[in-house]
Amino acid sequence: GSSTGNMLVDNEAVLEKIFLSTPMLIAVHCEDETTIKNNLAAFKEQYGDDVPVTAHNLIRSAEACYISSSKAVALAKRTGARLHIFHLSTAKEMELFTNKIPLEDKKITAEVCVHHLWFTDEDYKTKGNFIKWNPAVKTAEDRAELWKALNDGRIDVIATDHAPHTKEEKMQSYLNAPSGGPLVQHAVVAMFEAHHQGKITVEKIVEKMCHNPAKIFKIEKRGFIREGYHADLVIVNPSLPWSVKPENILYKCGWSPFEGYTFKSRITHTFVNGELVYNNFKVKDTRAGKRLLFDR
């Protein structure tokens, strides 16, 4: 399904050729374009140009997600391709994935985003376009199944789909506002909040946010605390409450869907390649970043 910039590959012959020909991991965002267009046309017929944001998860529906992701999984199984599906959002899609084999042996892996684990369609009423993502945030039932699949190993990675559109862009009408939002700064503390709520262990957070991405994408010398590895580290105080306010939001776009929320945990320090780059809301002006390298 086309998203920001109308990025889209949905020609079945082209897709099959890609799946058959590449030895590399194929990573995809799965929504069915035809289903989305048909749903949007129906809502436009009812509302004209004033379609409400509360329709977002009905336009970019669970059906649109499942049609596309099931097609990708079927293609991967038929061709033997290595497939990773980004930002899953529905309960039905969870039946496409397995926890019966070790991650290292999986040919098909899956990812969920922090916002799909946190928000539901009820939040559109208060958050509006500020939680307009593609795929859309779905129902509480969908969220519950995502948590279940994450903990039982069907979902392998927790990610953010970080897209820092400006506040002005997001305050446009639903049809004009871009999808996506900033989430990198608050991803870890949001997951620690879920830990405090008994939804996930700290070990599982580390596995899904650090170890597994490094394994799946074969990222060289990252994702683990090991001698000879790059020291990409955060220090988290699990019991240091703080509230998200405009003055401590570090995104250049200046807003967060978590604004006003008080987290129980706080990141106090961040190291990139062994260099301290963040210390208690202060970011060091540095060029600590380095190219990611990948094992063959």
Image (cartoon, rainbow, N blue to C red):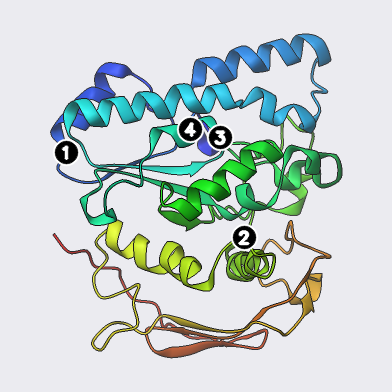
Q: CA distance from mark 4 to mark 3?
A: 6 Å
279 relative position to 52: left or right: left
Q: Amino acid at mark 2?
A: Lys
Instruction: Name the residue located 57 percent from the left edge and 63 percent from the top edge.
Output: 200
Instruction: Name the residue located 61 percent from the left edge and 25 percent from the top edge.
Output: 61
Residue where numbered disc 1 is placed: 22
Q: Element type at marker 4?
A: helix
Residue where numbered disc 2 is placed: 199
Q: Element type at marker 1?
A: loop
Q: Nearer the viewer, mark 1 or mark 3?
A: 3
Q: CA distance from mark 1 to mark 4?
A: 25 Å
Residue where numbered disc 3 is placed: 91
Tell me if label 4 and label 3 are in contact, CB under 8 Å: yes
Give the class, few, some or many, for how many residues have Cα within 10 Å of label 2's Cα (few <14, many ≥20).
Answer: few
N-terminal label among 2 and 3:
3
Q: Amino acid at mark 1?
A: Thr
N-terminal label among 1 and 3:
1
